[in-house]
Image: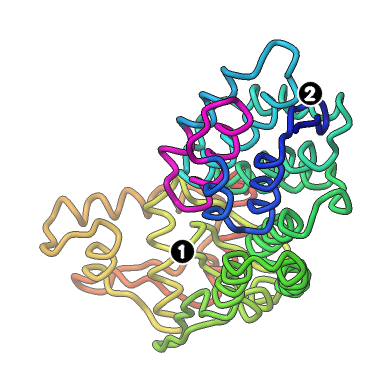
Amino acid sequence: MSDKRDGIPMDAPIAAAARALAGGDPLGALKRIALRDDAPALALRGIAMAQLGDLARAKVLLKSAARAFGPGESLARARCVVADAEIALVLRDLGRPSAALDTARATLEEHGDRVNAAFARYLEARRLLLIGRVDEAERALARLDPAALPPASRTAYELVVAGIALRRPRTKAARAALARARRAAELARIPALTAEVESARRVLDAPAARRIARGGERLLSLEEVEALRSSKVLVVDACRNVVHDDVQMAALATRPVLFALARALGEAWPGDVPRDVLVARVFASKFVDASHRARLRVEIGRLRKLPMGPEYLAAFTVGDQLLWGAAEPLRRMLRILLDAGIRH
């Protein structure tokens, strides 16, 4: 006895296997279809193997299923493409073109499969987040209606929302998203999802940065990092290679020597930095010779060519040492770098 669900043949074992997979029971699903090689069974076997962690085998089965579905079963093939895209994300295969997933999503929307279409959009947002395109990921999620997602997919959606908030950082929004993810995971009744949400919560609670100031250092929570970044304190951010305060920012990722100088100054504030120490820090050299000192003078010369003025840059020689004052010049250096066109 068999019938059709959304245009796809569904006999009793196939329907039972699909229900088992939806409930997070891949072994229960495989008991019903493990020996079958028709297209629906291949697709469900692929999903089951993915849930069990055998991703290589899962990809093979899903591709076989997509080929096995007939020309009139575009909806089933689109679902296989979406499942394969999810496995690619888990494998961190992030360089594949998104055209196949976009086509599959359009097919799903055309056939009225809102749940899988929304999940396809979620997968694209998650891929964008993983490759660091946070703004694009946020725009992709904004086009997604989470109400269309079942609890398991809603959990994954909220985890991406939390991931975006973490990278801003917007700690309050991240905690709210994780709370929603936890409620959705409880509704889904899938232990692996609950564990993933708990893991994300532990990441949020763990130290997020190390602050070095006035000769000491301490670990900061994400809330403290967020507060520091919005304060009037001048920050030399060694994670993003930027120097910023609450209103302006200079991105120095392409100016490593300038950033190294700024970092050395910031860590020494309110003291001074001897020339040999600067050379060792900036050029990562254990032995300082005349060539290093010459290179340092070149970099200082580049800074002096900026319209700083002597009151902005306290660099001077005393005997055989070059001292760099590290107090107020840092903030003024940021303004000068911004005026010179070095912006975020």
Q: Secondary structure at mark 2?
A: helix
Q: Say left or right for 258 vs 242.
A: left
Residue in front for this viewpoint, 206 or 334: 206
Residue extending farthest front: 1
Circle 2 is placed at which residue position? 107
Residue in front for this viewpoint, 111 or 5: 5
Which quadrant holds residue 43?
A: top right
Q: For the stretch drawn in magenta, what is the main secondary structure?
A: helix
Instruction: Name the spot of residue 124 as percent of width and height, x first.
Output: 67, 39
Q: Say left or right for 34 vs 17.
A: left
- Could you classify mark 1 by the number of other residues whose Cα lies within 10 Å: few (under 14), some (14-19), or many (20 or more)? some
Q: Which residues are magenta?
A: 34-59
Q: Secondary structure at mark 1?
A: loop
Which quadrant holds residue 128?
A: top right
Q: Residue at x 43, y 86 (%)?
A: 217
Residue in front for this viewpoint, 240 or 255: 240
Residue in front for this viewpoint, 266 or 217: 217
Q: Report the mark closest to the observer, 1 or 2.
A: 2
Instruction: Name the spot of residue 282 as percent of width and height, x first.
Output: 30, 59
Residue type, mark 2 in image: Thr
Which of the two discs, 1 and 2, labels the residue nearer the N terminus? 2
Disc ID at residue 238: 1
Residue type, mark 1 in image: Ala
Q: Residue at x 64, y 19 (%)?
A: 69
Instruction: Name the spot of residue 306 as percent of width and height, x first.
Output: 52, 49
Establish if 298 lies above or below 228: above
Q: Quadrant of the N terminus?
A: top right
Disc ID at residue 253: none
Residue extending farthest top: 71
Count of numbered marks: 2
Instruction: Name the spot of residue 332 as percent of width and height, x first.
Output: 59, 65
